[in-house]
Amino acid sequence: MTTPEAALHYRGMRLIRSFEEQALALVRSGEIVGGIHPYIGQEAVAVGVCAALRADDQLTSTHRGHGHVLAKGADPRRMLAELAGRESGLNKGRGGSMHAADLSLGILGANGIVGAGAPIAAGAAWAALRQGSDRVVATFFGDGALNQGVLLEAMNLAALWRLPVLFVCENNGYATTLAVRDGVAGSALGRAAAFGIPAQEVDGMDVAAVRAAAEQAVVRARSGAGPSFLECRTYRFEGHHTMERRVRVNYRTAEEIDSWRQRDPLELCGLDPVQRAEVDQEIAQLIAEAVRFALAGAHPDPAGALDHLYADGLRPRAGAPR
Amino acid sequence: MTKLSYAKALNRALADELARDPAVCVFGEDVGAGLSGLTPGLQARFGADRVVDTPLSEQAFTSLALGAALTGMRPVVEFQIPSLLFLVFEQIANQAHKISLMTGGQIAAPVTYVVPGSGSRDGWAGQHSDHPYSLFAHVGVKTLLPATPTDAYGLLVSAIRDPDPVVLFAPAGALGVREDVTTELAPVPIGSARIHRPGEDVTVVAAGHLVHDALAVAEELAGEISVEVFDPRSLYPFDWPALAASLARTGRLVVIDDSNRMCGLGAEVIATVAEQGHRLRALPRRITRPDGAVLPFALGLDRAVQPGRAQLRDAVRAVLS
Ligand SMILES: Cc1ncc(C[n+]2csc(CCOP(=O)(O)OP(=O)(O)O)c2C)c(N)n1
């Protein structure tokens, strides 16, 4: 017997995994230009955290954002269309992989700058307090962001003003090729402790553990007690970016990758094989449909390349395509 | 009739907008105490949760304001010194300015950034004397540079109500300006220039505190040369049709611009005028800080680097000779 949660968690992770595998294939076939930062291996973090969130809660994400965006409920068809640069994409093809956003779902945007989402999340949390809402905001970031001043500044403000923020550090061991031990003095938890933010280390391959920790943090945030910090120990099975295949950098051993693959979050979540097969089939259909939808979408008209630059329609004068 | 100071005008704009719209809020260092002169009395009137004293965390509170703007607030961020904009260029130019386009128009980012004391203050030296409006105009962030108290009031009100990020530079050299206010203060549309003094012989484009220098020079030369003083007020967007109309009358152009020469506003104005094919009766002139300038400390050196009245007078005479 497996729990209903396990089925839900597995479905969420399967969706992200299959989406990513399909996206990798589309990068290889040239349908997705610019490449992607694959999230494969880290699915338990996005699914566990988002399972603890309400629909009106919000999040900010990173350059490796597909998992967070899908886990928060983004339509995989429009998301894949976005990656393929189509008008039918979440962002009308203006954002692409690193900026996928759906404001209607509280996804305030993935972000191409390491650490940049944290103060934005703090601002959304500050606004929630001002507006008398009990919504909370999760901000995802990697271990590399632990050395960005702006993240530490945001942690200070969040702690000082008791903002309802979940700081979710996805420690996958590397910032591009730099190992954590060579990049982070002290520790992730130590960073949080310095600001008096309750922090805990979580097995980031175990979706139920991530969810349980996130639920605690959400309760704390909603009660007005302020931010929490989760360090999710996880691993990315693929390269930092799809470009990595071509440049052939070597910074992880095959044994290390293998040992983490033994702890694949999809295998660990404990859904029984019959149910898994059903979910797999459902997701396979969904992804096939997403590919059809994405590739059938129209390419944006180059004459509109600067549409949406300003909210009130003001257009630049020179150099504009129109 | 009352004498309104430039700083008081900004203070009144903030107070009026805070009173009008509960989504408006102010973030900055020492805003409760009103150290910069823009915010005195506001915290007492509107509360510390709307006029928020921040720790010295410019990068965080600049993007915190963005996050609040994305979720229904209309924040105004005050910066104590202009060079802090270099610190938060990422948060303004790379985050706030880009989010509307990058999300395909899903969201607007109504944040106002106010920089009181931009440019040279006597003896503040290298790191406190920049006047970095050209950087923001170049990126395409809406960039305002009011010269007078009524324009300061009107442009700040428009900035706060605008759905996009807007940077308003209040030049140090204009903060002391006072004005008799006879009519009711009103919003000034972003992108609208103002002719402070009509003239027939030459158009002088000047912005911020330099408008007052241009007016002084125009007055000095009045018997000899008829100078039109053209103040764009908003550097981005720039009111090109108004400038074209002015040049059609005068046929001569001098630009005075308190930023570095290379890639500056002066270059932009002259390039655009050339491109648009205006038939000028003399070669245009620009007066700027030098290429790559950093303001030196000693007052004589500081003044030597800044554009001033004597240079403007010479340039005006030169285009008429
Ligand atoms: C401030 C900043 N510096 C550098 C980069 C280039 N860059 C993009 S991702 C990345 C590594 C980030 O590592 P980490 O935060 O651990 O996240 P992960 O890639 O492991 O998910 C770097 C250096 C960037 N985007 N932003």
Image: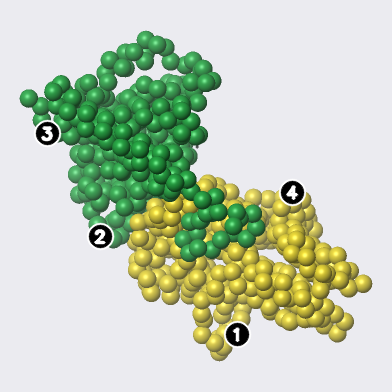
Q: Between marks 3 and 2, how big is the CA–CA gap? A: 33 Å
Do the residues under discs 4 and 2 have CB atoms within 8 angstroms? no
Chain painted green: A
State the residue position of label 1: B180
* Residue at 68% from the left image edge and 50% from the top image edge: B126
State the residue position of label 4: B292
Task: Please determine if labels 4 and 3 lie on a single subunit.
Answer: no
State the residue position of label 2: A132
Sequence order check, earlier mark of 4 and 1: 1
- Chain letter of mark 4 equals B
Label 2 Cα crowd, 10 Å radius (few <14 / some 14-19 / many 20+): few
Label 3 Cα crowd, 10 Å radius (few <14 / some 14-19 / many 20+): few
Q: Between marks 4 and 2, how big is the CA–CA gap? A: 49 Å
Q: Nearer the viewer, mark 1 or mark 2?
A: 2
Check disc 3 and report its element: helix, strand or loop: helix
Residue A4 got which mark? 3
Q: Tag 4: residue type?
A: Gly
B189 left or right of A136 in image: right
- Chain letter of mark 1 equals B
